[in-house]
Image (cartoon, grey):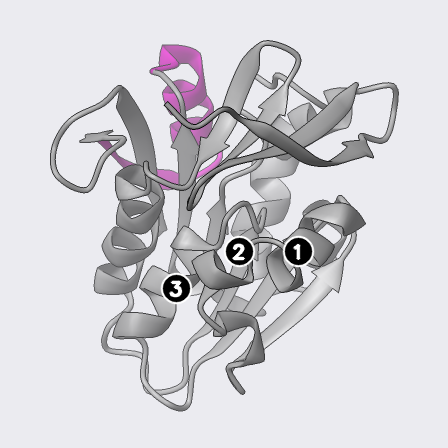
Amino acid sequence: MIPWTLIDTATLPGKGGELRLKQRGTEFSIMLGSNELMNSRLSGSEEALATLSCQRIEGQPQPRILIGGLGMGFTLRAALAVLGPQAQVEVAELVPAVVAWARGPMASVFAGCLDDARVSIVVGDVGRQIAAGPARYDAILLDVDNGPEGLTIAGNDSLYDDAGLHAARTALRPGGVLAVWSSGPDRSFTQRLRKAGFTVEETKVRASRHGGGARHVIWLALRR
């Protein structure tokens, strides 16, 4: 078996630890300690985050979407595949090295999607984009940390608390959708979404696009 090679490291803000980008042949992995956060072979649930969200806003002729977390670009690529030419997609990524990896060693995984004219990349906190103004987005897709129960950066928790969900609802246009990826279920988060004024759907999806791997959770919260 081909051994893993360490390609690069990146320090997370707020004493969140160190990300490690590793490669084995054509496969990439992003690790935090002993936890694998992302693997280039497992894209199913991230792609579902995009496709399920875009289905909810397919009637919008010029949709504007915010994606929180670049990751390995699977959510972005899936969104671009189903959105029309008039769409605008903002991607907010907190860690500059992740963007550099996308344009450098992982360029083959991203397949040029960062150069799509519909895409703009913001290196910074997605929470700031959400708070920038009311009714700006038709969809907000959050694939940040491990979901509502954060694993890497404590500040990410503010996206999922009552104030964070209120901010997201304010940032959405009427009929817009807040979609959240998580590594597992969280009943209290479902309750917070409903309390914040969303109609909530909870879907379990497999990590692999072929139906295998771990079961992840996607919340689709519709602004009433």
Q: Secondary structure at mark 1?
A: strand
Tell me what residue is drawn at x 21 percent, y 62 percent: 55
> Residue 186 magenta-drawn?
yes
- Compare marks 1 and 3 and give the one earlier in the sequence: 3
Label 1 – label 3 distance at C-alpha: 15 Å
Q: Is residue 52 above or below residue 133?
A: above
Q: Amino acid at mark 2?
A: Ile
Farthest front residue in view: 1
Image coords of residue 186 (percent x, y): 39, 14
Q: Amino acid at mark 3?
A: Arg
Q: Which region is colored magenta? A: 185-203
- CB contact under 8 Å: marks 1 and 3: no
Image coords of residue 14 (percent x, y): 87, 24
- Compare marks 3 and 2 and give the one earlier in the sequence: 2
- The front one of 178 and 118 is 118
Is residue 148 in sight in this rendering? no
- What residue does disc 3 label? 77
- CB contact under 8 Å: marks 2 and 1: yes
